[in-house]
């Protein structure tokens, strides 16, 4: 646990230091920014967060569904045909939810 916390602290400090290394000179970018640019940037940030959370949730759900199905097949190999079809159908439905999130993210981004 201590090792993980140490790595997290190093990673976060590296990210903070690296962001200042790529900063623009002076405050010209802030002075010329208009509220429309900020709204566009926030919509893009929202779209990115939406699709990343949806992809993470979809991947976790698909992994759990496949693991449970394969565990059931391992316990009862004769039920393979009865398990595979609902498993594939559920994986398709989970993936369709992620695709819906992608479409919504594209609409948010403009």
Image: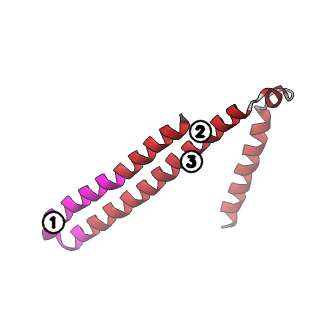
**Span of residues in magenta:** 72-95
- Residue carrying label 1: 82
Does label 3 or label 2 sit earlier along the sequence?
A: 2
**Nearer to us: label 2 or label 1:** 2
Residue 78's quadrant in the figure? bottom left
Task: Tell me the element at label 2.
Answer: helix
- Measured as percent of width and height from the top left, residue 54 is found at 47, 52
- Residue carrying label 2: 44
User: Measuring 76% from the left and 31% from the top, which residue is drawn there?
Assistant: 22
Task: Tell me the element at label 3.
Answer: helix
Does label 3 or label 1 sit earlier along the sequence?
A: 3
- Measured as percent of width and height from the top left, residue 93 is found at 31, 54
User: Measuring 48% from the left and 38% from the top, which residue is drawn there?
Assistant: 106
On the picture, is 21 further left or further right than 100? right
- Residue carrying label 3: 49
Q: Is residue 109 magenta?
A: no
**Nearer to us: label 3 or label 1:** 3
């Amino acid at each position: 646990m201590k090792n993980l916390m140490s790595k997290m602290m190093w990673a976060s400090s590296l990210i903070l230091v690296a962001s200042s290394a790529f900063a623009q000179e002076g405050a010209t970018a802030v002075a010329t920014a208009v509220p429309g640019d900020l709204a566009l940037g926030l919509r893009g940030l929202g779209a990115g967060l939406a699709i990343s959370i949806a992809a993470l949730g979809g991947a976790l759900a698909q992994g759990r569904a496949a693991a449970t199905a394969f565990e059931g097949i391992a316990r009862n190999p004769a039920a393979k045909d009865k398990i595979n079809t609902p498993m594939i159908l559920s994986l398709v439905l989970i993936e369709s939810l992620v695709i819906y999130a992608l479409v919504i993210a594209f609409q948010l981004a403009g």
